[in-house]
Image (spheres, rainbow, N blue to C red):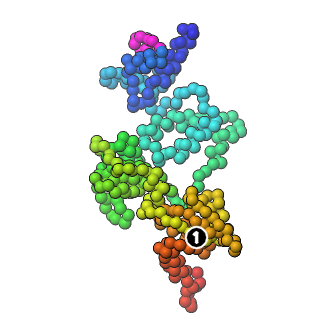
């Protein structure tokens, strides 16, 4: 390999080893990293390379205090080879749309240059820009009534994601539904869950074992503590979801047996209620669906949505809830007395 090629590869490796602001790397540490890559260079030559590269790339030296350190500027575009393909750029652009609320702020900040590079790659695509227009052709829509997302304080979200990332406790001010004043608490953050338009924090209050779910938009203040967060024994977010706790249920499972009118139940062939779901076609064309499901308010809302197109055959408690809801709705929509318009 020629001297020129060796210098080019060394400088490329050097640029990749320089972190993004506010992180920084000293010349000595960078020299050790380059040695790990197989490049031997004196500290003086390395300093000269960095000074020369700073004229062409967005790298800067923080000389406010020793030891001095080098960083990529915070808003510098990402530098990587090979260049992004249209498919890679599309994937990054779509990931940016869906990860805004779920990634810790420091991680999201590190990814922003890549997201920017993806958008620039798509914008630079020559006509007819089919890849760029793909973003206008793909959407994720809710299966239920669409609701607007509540506003979340940016400082609160940053503190919550930082505490989750570093597994630290949080001091919060939180307002319960229907109350006018905030309550203060110390919590152990456990997980972050996006449920429809609402972002929830799964956490423990103080040293209690029970797990609570707090909508992030009701937290007005959050500050990370130094103490480590403590997780309950055998905590599993996936198990919580599978048991229906994130549908606000008790965690109990029931065996559901329900009769569906064919047009209301046919979609369950393609999107089953559970892994053990069974569908029997009855002589009158109705579908008898049997499945083990979590007993949750979400289940009741879903069943009520079919109106008279479904009948729950077992589970007395569930039939009672549906019957009471139907009676209440009937009383609301009953025909008014004479002189009052019919609804």
The furthest residue to the bottom: 338
| One can see residue 68 in this view | yes
Q: Residue at x 45, y 18 (%)?
A: 36
Question: Does residue 96 appear left or right of residue 232 in this picture?
Answer: right
In the picture shown, does residue 74 fall above or below 204?
A: above
Q: Residue at x 43, y 41 (%)?
A: 105
Q: Which residues are magenta?
A: 39-47
In the picture shown, does residue 293 fall above or below 50?
A: below
Q: Residue at x 57, y 43 (%)?
A: 94
The residue to which callout 1 is attached is 258
145, 298: nearer the viewer: 298
In the picture shown, does residue 41 fall above or below 22?
A: above
Question: Does residue 279 appear left or right of residue 332 in this picture?
Answer: right
70, 243: nearer the viewer: 243
| One can see residue 155 in this view | no
Q: Position of residue 55 (x, y in %)?
A: 48, 19
Q: Position of residue 101 (x, y in %)?
A: 47, 48
In the picture shown, does residue 265 fall above or below 340?
A: above
Question: Does residue 217 appear left or right of residue 299 in this picture?
Answer: left
Q: Is residue 40 magenta?
A: yes
Question: Does residue 15 appear left or right of residue 121 in this picture?
Answer: left
Q: Position of residue 146 (x, y in %)?
A: 55, 60
The furthest residue to the top: 3
Q: Residue at x 47, y 55 (%)?
A: 241
Q: Position of residue 155 (x, y in %)?
A: 38, 47
């Amino acid at each position: 390999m020629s001297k020129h090629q060796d210098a080019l590869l060394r400088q490329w490796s050097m640029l990749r080893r320089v972190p993004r602001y506010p992180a920084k790397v000293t010349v000595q540490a960078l020299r050790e990293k380059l040695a790990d890559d197989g490049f031997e260079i004196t500290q003086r030559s390395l300093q000269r390379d960095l000074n020369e590269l700073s004229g062409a790339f967005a790298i800067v030296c923080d000389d406010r205090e020793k030891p001095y350190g080098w960083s990529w500027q915070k808003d510098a575009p990402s530098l990587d080879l090979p260049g992004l393909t249209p498919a890679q750029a599309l994937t990054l652009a779509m990931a940016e749309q869906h990860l805004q609320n779920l990634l810790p702020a420091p991680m999201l900040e590190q990814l922003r240059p890549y997201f920017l590079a993806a958008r620039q790659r798509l914008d630079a695509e020559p006509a007819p820009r089919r890849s760029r227009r793909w973003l206008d052709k793909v959407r994720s829509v809710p299966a239920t009534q669409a609701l607007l997302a509540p506003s979340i304080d940016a400082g609160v979200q940053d503190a919550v994601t930082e505490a989750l990332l570093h597994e630290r406790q949080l001091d919060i001010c939180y307002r319960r539904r229907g109350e006018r004043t905030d309550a203060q608490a110390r919590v152990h953050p456990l997980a972050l869950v996006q449920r429809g338009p609402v972002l929830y924090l799964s956490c423990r209050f103080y040293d209690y074992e029970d797990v609570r779910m707090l909508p992030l938009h009701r937290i007005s203040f959050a500050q990370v503590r130094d103490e480590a967060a403590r997780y309950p024994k055998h905590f599993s977010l996936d198990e919580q979801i599978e048991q229906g706790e994130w549908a606000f249920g008790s965690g109990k499972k029931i065996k559901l047996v329900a009769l569906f009118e064919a047009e209301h139940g046919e979609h369950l062939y393609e999107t089953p209620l559970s892994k053990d779901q069974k569908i029997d076609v009855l002589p009158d064309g109705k579908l008898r669906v049997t499945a083990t499901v979590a007993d949750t308010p979400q289940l009741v809302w879903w069943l009520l949505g079919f109106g008279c197109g479904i009948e729950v055959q077992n589970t007395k408690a569930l039939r009672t809830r549906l019957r009471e809801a139907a009676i209440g709705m009937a009383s609301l929509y009953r025909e008014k007395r004479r002189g009052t318009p019919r609804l």
